[in-house]
Amino acid sequence: MLRVGLTGGIGSGKSTVAQRFLELGALVIDADLLAREVVAVGSPGLAAIHQRFGDAVLAADGSLDRGALGEIVFADLSARRDLEAITHPLIAARTHALLESAAPDRILVHDVPLLVEKDMTADYHLTVVVGADEDIRVARLTGARGFTAADAQGRIAAQASDGARRAAADAWLDNNGTVEALLVQVDDLWQNRIVGFNDNLLTGRRSHRPDTPTLVAYDDSWPSTATRLIGRITLALKAAGLGEAGVEVAHIGSTSVPGLPAKDVIDLQVGVRRLTDADLPEFVKALADKGFPRVDGSDNSNHQDTVHAWAPDAALWAKRFHGSADPGRVAHVHVREQHSAGWEGSLLFRDWLVANPSERDEYADLKRALARAEATTTAYTLAKEPWIDGALERARVWARHTGWSAP
């Protein structure tokens, strides 16, 4: 089941997006609705809130006075945490029950207002954020929802910043315009990314870029993208009881070097204590279920890096390879044994390029020239090997002089 986390600040239009996903066929679980359900009259949740906050949070009919409770918790961090300690476990249990009852091929959209604040990005295959400028959100809250300007601004200030939300977003839906413009973005995301992602997840396929060496300028969003993917891989391995097998995950390759042009592909490296750990069925399944299917087949590059003269034993360059099932984010996951030549070489090459801008620029010039000259990505990659071979020798000299060691 593809799990999409949907979030956005108060007044951003998140509910409109959730409704559209429902119309498109998603199973939408609304955390706010569940939050109301678990504190209904007669519920254990309401009893616990009454005990903690007193009669002031009850309406005349015995139901929860959400306005009165809101005034207390938005002004008092400790009170807000106490409320969350009561409601969040109840909401989580209800969410789990709904998920268990859903068909495995159903696309889940989980509408979670505090997804970013609770650092829940890794829980989902994809995080969708609805964004709007603060002045527009204040106008919506004071107009349609009857907030005072001060109350609206206070609610906004109590939530995550736009910067934090952008860092968490795999997809950002801009809602500074009309509802119609927002729905066009939702439909496009559904048809061109979410549906394909779900199909790939169910069939174990990975996404590909066209087999032409197309370079783009360095993108400042690559590090945050890599961080999200690393979080998902780490969580998947930990949840499967494989924390010792997947001991570290790192961003490598050209997209990890600021200022370096690259193919728009995020390369990650999973370091394992023993390469055989990567062949465990539970390891393979954990990554596949999280959207990173294993790639086998006749292509030897999926199992072997180029052997270099300073480490001539081919076994030191062995690896396993996983791709990304997300059509909107091609990623390559290289699983290597810690302290092998391939593992160390990937980290060294990255750090050496970062520390030596002249070498980075020379590599950039070579990449641009080969991208123009070679017709396929395979040919482009092979054509780089002589330069990389010499570069790794220079990087090893640099490592000895600087005392560099792999993290």
Image (cartoon, rainbow, N blue to C red):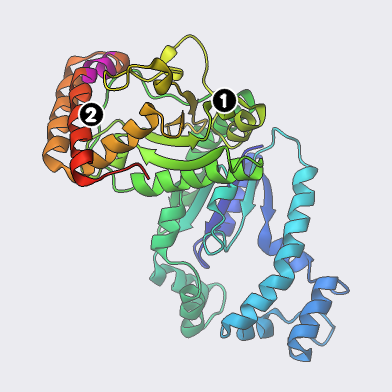
Q: Quadrant of residue 236?
A: top right
Residue at 24%, 19% (x, y): give it.
Answer: 385
- Measured from the top left, where is residue 152 in percent x and y? 50, 78
Above or below, 129 against 46 in this view is above
The mark found on residue 392 in the picture is 2
Q: Amino acid at mark 1?
A: Thr
Magenta segment, principal secondary structure? helix
The mark found on residue 276 in the picture is 1
- Span highlighted in magenta in the image: 379-385
**Local crowd at mark 2 within 10 Å, few (<14), some, or many (≥20)?**
some
Q: Earlier in the sequence, mark 2 or mark 1?
A: 1
Above or below, 36 against 142 in this view is above
- Measured from the top left, where is residue 280 in percent x and y? 63, 27
In-image side of 134 versus 289 (left or right): left
Q: CA distance from mark 2 to mark 1?
A: 27 Å
In-image side of 154 versus 256 (left or right): right
